[in-house]
Image (spheres, rainbow, N blue to C red):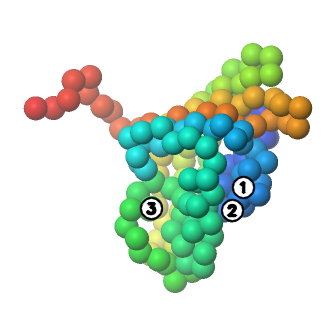
Amino acid sequence: MSEIRAFLEQHLAGIFAYDVEHYRRTVSEDLGLFEWYITPHRIDGVPFHEFLMTEAKRAGAVPLVGDALQDGQRAAEPPRVRFDLANYREQRYGDTAVCSYTLLTSTGSGTGIKVQAYNESRVIVKFAEGWKVVHVHKSPTYTSPITPPR
C-alpha cells in the first residue's frame, strides 16, 4: 500500500469515527468540497464539517453518509460503518496526489445493513507537516442523462 493510500484510509477512518482533531490535522484550512447529497454548492473551510462530525458523534447519531443525514431519525445505538475504496486510482505529481475511487459504505444498525456507493476524488498535497486533503469532489454513481428529462 502506498503512503498516500495509507494516509487516505486513516483520514477516512477518522471521519467515520467523528474524530474532529484528526480531521483538522489531515485537511487544509482552505479545504473545498462538492458533496452532491448535502448541497449543490461548494462548501469551503473546515467549520461546516466540524459541526457535522460533532453532531454525529453524539450518542445515537446518524452516520455521515449519504441520505442518512436527511431522515433525522436517531438510532438506539450509534451505527457501525465500514468503508471500502473500489476501483482505487492514485495519480502522483511530486507533492500532489489525486485519488479517485468509488466509496462503498456499509452501515449496520438496529434496522439492518445499508450499503451505499458514490464516486469520490480527493486532492492531497504534502506540506511541511505532512499530507493534507485540499479538495474533495463527490458524485452519485447512478447514470445521468446528458440532457435533463422533460
Residue ID for mark 1 = 14
> How far across and down, in percent of the image, does residue 88 sit?
63, 32
Identify which residue is drawn at 58% across, 36% down.
32
Q: Nearer the viewer, residue 79 or 115?
A: 79
Q: Amino acid at mark 1?
A: Gly
Q: Are marks 1 and 2 in contact (CB under 8 Å)?
A: yes
Mark 3 is surrounded, within 10 Å at the Cα level, by few (under 14), some (14 to 19) or many (20 or more) other residues, namely some
Q: Is residue 92 above or below residue 72?
A: above
Secondary structure under tag 2 reads loop
Q: Earlier in the sequence, mark 2 or mark 3?
A: 2
Considering the numbered disc 3 on the image, is that residue within a helix, a strand or a loop? helix
Category of crowding for the residue at label 2, using alpha-carbon neighbours closer than 10 angstroms: few (below 14), some (14–19), many (at least 20): some
Q: Position of residue 51 (x, y in %)?
A: 58, 61
The part of the image, by quadrant, that contains residue 63 is: bottom right
Answer yes or no: is residue 86 visible: no
Q: CA distance from mark 2 to mark 3?
A: 16 Å
Identify the amino acid type marked 2. Answer: Ala
Q: Residue at x 65, y 37 (%)?
A: 30
Question: Where is mark 2, residue-wise?
Answer: 17
Q: Which mark is residue 69?
A: 3
Kind of residue indicated by mark 3: Leu
Q: CA distance from mark 1 to mark 2?
A: 5 Å
Q: Locate residue 67 relative to residue 94 in the image: left or right.
A: left
Q: Is label 1 in a helix, a strand or a loop?
A: helix
